[in-house]
Image (cartoon, helix red, strand yellow):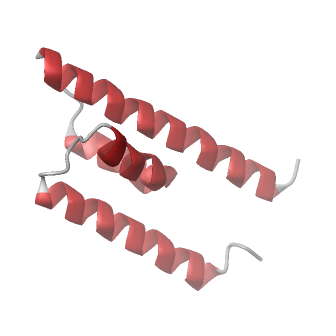
Amino acid sequence: MTETHIVWGWLVLINLITLAAFRHDKQRAIHGGPRIRERDLLTLAAIGGTIGAWLGMRIFRHKTRKDGFSMALFLIAAAQCALIILFDISA
């Protein structure tokens, strides 16, 4: 297994976990259960789950009115894009 396979495997896994976390938190919000901290949702995005976070926001209509959360997610995505360009991870 190459490094590329490991990276892609990690990205698929963390994005699925992040998407599931958004769904779980939305269900807790609806039913009044204990919530997942925004910091934890953003941490999942920061470690590679940005696409899962974005999809979770759109699919489940979750955290879409939280401007601070949306800005933090945007900044995480921008930083990740900058790192990809800086380190040319695709090479």
Foreground: 36 or 61? Answer: 61
Q: Does residue 47 appear in this view?
A: no
Q: In the displayed structure, does residue 1 sit left or right of residue 8?
A: right
Q: In the displayed structure, does residue 33 sit left or right of residue 83?
A: left
Q: In the displayed structure, does residue 70 sit left or right of residue 2?
A: left
> Residue at the location (42% across, 30% down)?
20
In the rendered image, residue 21, in percent from the top left (x then y), is placed at 37, 32
Q: Which quadrant of the structure image shows residue 3?
A: bottom right
> Residue at the location (34% across, 29% down)?
23
> Residue at the location (51% across, 44% down)?
15
Q: Which quadrant of the structure image shows residue 89?
A: bottom right
Q: In the displayed structure, does residue 51 sit left or right of residue 10?
A: left
Q: Quadrant of the C terminus?
A: bottom right
In the rendered image, residue 29, in percent from the top left (x then y), is placed at 16, 25
In the rendered image, residue 14, in percent from the top left (x then y), is placed at 53, 42
Q: Is residue 76 above or below residue 56?
A: below
Q: Is residue 21 above or below residue 2?
A: above
